[in-house]
Amino acid sequence: MRDLIELTGMVLKSTSVGEYDRRLVLLTRERGKITAFARGAKRPGNRLMAPSRPFAFGTFKLYEGREAYNLQDAEISRYFEELSQDMEGACCGQYFLEFGDYYSRENLDGSSMLLLIYQSLRAILKPSIPNRLVRRVFELKAMAIGGEYTERPPRAVSDSAAYAWEYVVGAPLEKLYTFTLTDSVLEEFAECVEINKKRFIDREFHSLEVLKVMAGE
């Protein structure tokens, strides 16, 4: 039997397989994005039921199979269950998971993207930071982690918007959400992020379309 391995990560996606099982997409610090099966996770009372939910963050204990992993146990330190009380926040968080799924790859270091998603989910739960700012900061930093960004805004903007852009690109992930912007500066910042998204990202995100409707965009 293969050795049991422990990976730190978060559930990006959870889908039903058969009557009792779930197929998980995990973003892990050590091995990037992986697929794992949680056998029996849909059975009432099964110990894998809670760790198989999207947003679950912690240590996952798995056996490595030929094409996927098998989840044996998990120690979850954060479920982000507070998001269930905020529909817009939950949708924003789902977008972060979908975006992270898009940018992550197997067997590549996933630590930066994992920490970005974690910090961004925490930021959503802070009333002092507008969700729209969190979303745009997340998008720009995710593109920077993926190596697809411009060091300065892609068009002429105010000094405040330019400073915010340069700060997000260069700031440590732990200090990313330590500022706010006026409405006019946020509008400039958001427009520039959108320009880069159209330049570098070749797909649509379902959760973003829902989020736009909810946010009245």
Image: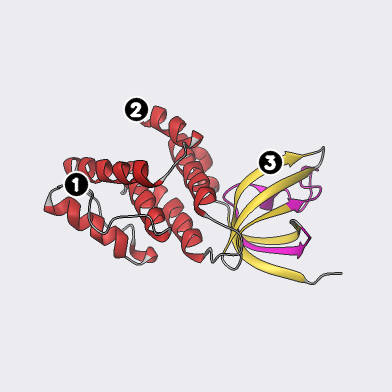
On screen, residue 54 above or below 10: above
Tell me the SS state at disc 2: loop
Q: Amino acid at mark 3?
A: Thr
Q: Nearer the viewer, mark 3 or mark 1?
A: 1
Residue 171 is situated, as x and y percent measured from the top left of the image, at 31, 65
Q: Nearer the viewer, mark 2 or mark 3?
A: 3
Instruction: Find numbered disc 3 in the image and state the secondary structure of the residue it sits on.
Output: strand
Q: Which residue is mark 1?
A: 155
Nearer the observer: mark 1 or 2; the answer is 1
Task: Report if residue 60 lies within the magenta region.
Answer: yes
- Element under disc 1: loop
Q: Nearer the viewer, residue 14 or 49?
A: 14
Residue farthest toward the right in the current orientation of the protein:
1
> How far is disc 2 from disc 3 in space, using C-alphas?
29 Å
Label 3 with label 1: CB-CB less than 8 Å:
no
> What label sits on residue 216 in the rendered view?
2
Q: Which residue is mark 3?
A: 15
Q: Amino acid at mark 1?
A: Arg
Sequence order check: which comes first, mark 3 or mark 1? 3
Q: Is residue 126 visible?
A: no
Task: Write the residue at 51% across / 65% down.
Answer: 111
Q: Quadrant of residue 162?
A: bottom left
Residue occupying image coordinates x 37% and y 58%: 144
Neighbour class for label 2 at 10 Å: few (<14), some, many (≥20)? few
Count of residue discs: 3
**Magenta segment, which residues?**
37-66
CB under 8 Å between discs 2 and 3? no
Q: In the image as oriented, which residue stretches furthest toward the bottom?
A: 3
